[in-house]
Image: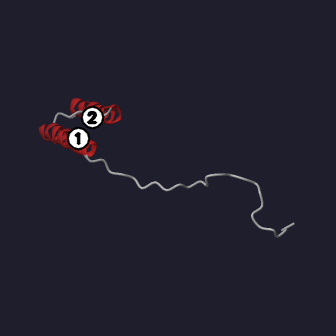
Amino acid sequence: MGLPISLFALQMVSVIGSLLIIIFSFQFGVIVGLLLFNALFYGALGRWVKRPFTFQVQNNFPSTISNKRLSPLSHA
């Protein structure tokens, strides 16, 4: 089970950020918490790859754009 490039990059940003926090924080609880967070985050990304959340995107734009008047009435 692998991650696509974009999700892998997101995971690496999370890992690097966690490493920066670990370097400047010498508390054992923070280290364990960040390791747990990264493991859960990887699991969530892996589950999302297997069953992606589908976005319901509606077409916001018309199929054609025209300056043609749709009404026979003159507004000028």
- Quarter holding the N terminus? top left
CA neighbours of label 2 inside 10 A, class few (<14), some (14 to 19), many (20+): some
User: What residue sits right under mark 1 in the picture?
Assistant: 46
Residue type beneath disc 2? Leu
Residue at (27, 45) in percent of width and height: 48
CA neighbours of label 1 inside 10 A, class few (<14), some (14 to 19), many (20+): some
How many marks are shown on the rendered structure?
2
Residue at (68, 52) in percent of width and height: 65
In percent of width and height, residue 45 lies at 26, 42
Q: Is residue 13 above or below residue 65?
A: above
The quadrant in which residue 28 appears is top left
Residue type beneath disc 1? Gly
- Quarter holding the C terminus? bottom right
Q: Earlier in the sequence, mark 1 or mark 2?
A: 2
For label 1, the SS is: helix
In percent of width and height, residue 51 lies at 26, 47
Q: Contact (CB < 8 A) between labels 1 and 2?
A: yes
In percent of width and height, residue 27 lies at 15, 37
In percent of width and height, residue 50 lies at 24, 44
CA gap between label 1 and label 2 equals: 7 Å
Left or right side of 34 for 73 = right
The circle on residue 18 is: none
The quadrant in which residue 61 appears is bottom right
User: What residue sits right under mark 2 in the picture?
Assistant: 3
Give 6 or 16, whichever is nearer the viewer.
6
Q: Is residue 63 above or below residue 16?
A: below
Give 8 or 30, whichever is nearer the viewer.
8
Left or right side of 75 for 44 = left
Q: Is residue 55 above or below residue 70?
A: above
Residue at (25, 33) in percent of width and height: 15
